[in-house]
Image: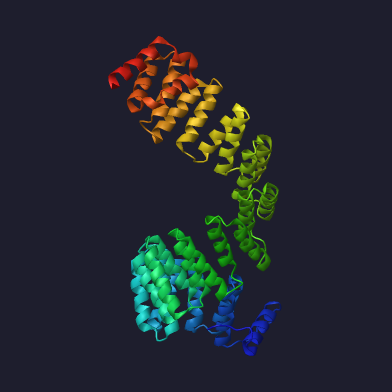
Amino acid sequence: MEFSQHDDDNNYSLTKFESMLKTNNVLFFDSSEFENIIQFYFENGRIALAKKAIKLGLEQHPSSIVLRLFQVEIYILEDKLPQAEKLLDELYILEPSNEEIYIQKASILSKRDQHEKAIDTLKIALKLSDADEEDADLYALIGMEYLFMDQFENAKNYFIKCLELDMEDYSALYNIIYCFEFLDLNDEAIDFLNQYLDKNPYCEVAWHQLGKQYFALKDYSKSLSAYEFAIISDDTFVGAYLEKGKVLEKLKKYEEAIENYNVTLALDDPTSFALLRIGNCYEKLGSDDLAVQYYFKTVHEDPLLDKGWISITRFYNKKNDYHKALYYINKAINIDADNVRYWKLYAQINQRLNFIEEAERGYKKTLDLGNYELDTWLARTDTLIALGEYEASALNLIQAAEFYPETAEIEYRLAGIYFTLLENEKGQYHLKNGLLLSEDYSFIIQELFPLIAGHQMVVNIISNSKKTSK
């Protein structure tokens, strides 16, 4: 039962209950008052107060089925599933046709990842329910269970049932579109949204979702129109202005994009996303001073947004001002030392500044944080070679080969390293492997190991390979 703060009786009950908690006096409430108080606390996320109300309620009304069902809900929230099951079994004996018992049983099954059984149990509750509002809630719960099992088609069908009962159930609408997107059915999502808009033409949420579908298909003109209709339907809809700005950027209409992003700043508190996009637009327009000004506003608004720091760093990178770029990427790392993108940029900038030891440290940290891209392995190898750390560079490449077997760039580097270490047998093996994989990368020997490139053994292996390939 919904608790309304505008209902004088209910408001009085809540005030009376909270006053009682501040004293040692225990006052009497009828069971319906407790139900409303508990429901209010649940809806407002005040679980500790809900628990107190349930405890007192059951002391005064120990036989109340509804209050005991609230106790079941608390048990489930606290993961006390055996206690919840035991109480549900007792309640089932008393009221076997109470659909709420089946809903809570389904919740327990869901928590145990028994989603098929949860669905079967919810379908029993559906047969017992006698109100459209309850049906809609049950359809939504069944839809969520199908989502847990990645059965998006079934989930979509149940969320559609929710929408059929309540055209303004936007939660169901979002879930329907999520299912379409996961199934890569953008065209079908567009058809569905257009049918929905025929019945509900001023639904800004549907226009917004339609714009996103056209954007995914790169139909930017239709996407733009959809967002404009969303704004006509609700001219305070911040999300529509943001998405419209993104479309305008794709159409290279940067000044119009800035106007839309600025509308969002006027309508609501500044968002780091809008500030960042404005900065990007100004950079595209060649207004560097304004661009960097907005990038700094972005990181001031949200210091944890990596895209803001990366934009600042790349801005100075493009200007060849590597010292400033390094300064700001260091600031970013001080804020979030586990951001792999920061460390990769840090390594690249240090390499440009010829700070080889720091560059190697950056690439190692990038790998430690899970960035296993081939260019990261190779870049670290090259810095280790430049530092004369041949054993470490060989070990690094052997690790890389686990992720990228039969890769010419790795084989040539290993060849050069082993020849440098006078391990000629290993050098020959890897050089021949490299030549078999691709002769195009043989320049690596000349570039990274110029002293080795002129050795007769190396020259012979390369020239014999070229003769054979002819």
- Between 442 and 431, the residue placed more toward the observer is 442
* Residue extending furthest toward the top: 456
* Quadrant for the C terminus in the image: top left
Question: Is residue 240 placed above or below 341 in the rendered structure?
Answer: below
* Residue extending furthest toward the bottom: 9
Q: Is residue 192 left or right of residue 298?
A: left
Q: Position of residue 347 (x, y in %)?
A: 58, 34
- Between 319 and 166, the residue placed more toward the observer is 319
What is the basis of the colouring in this image? rainbow
Question: Which residue is at a point 52% across and 56% down the rendered structure image?
Answer: 250
Question: Is residue 231 placed above or below 33 in the rendered structure?
Answer: above
Q: Where is residue 73 in the image (x, y as percent from the top left)?
A: 49, 73
What count of labels does the image hold? 0
Q: Position of residue 28 (x, y in %)?
A: 62, 87
Question: Which residue is at a point 57% across and 61% down the rendered structure image?
Answer: 245
Question: Which residue is at a point 35% across and 23% down the rendered structure image?
Answer: 435
Q: Position of residue 310 (x, y in %)?
A: 60, 45
Res 239 seen here:
yes
Res 138 seen here:
no
- Between 293 and 287, the residue placed more toward the observer is 287
Question: Which residue is at a point 45% across and 59% down the rendered structure image?
Answer: 216
- Between 399 and 240, the residue placed more toward the observer is 240
Question: Is residue 335 placed above or below 401 in the rendered structure?
Answer: below
Q: In this view, does 43 lie to the left or right of 293?
A: left
Q: In this view, does 299 lie to the left or right of 43?
A: right
Q: Quadrant of residue 464?
A: top left
Question: Is residue 16 placed above or below 325 in the rendered structure?
Answer: below
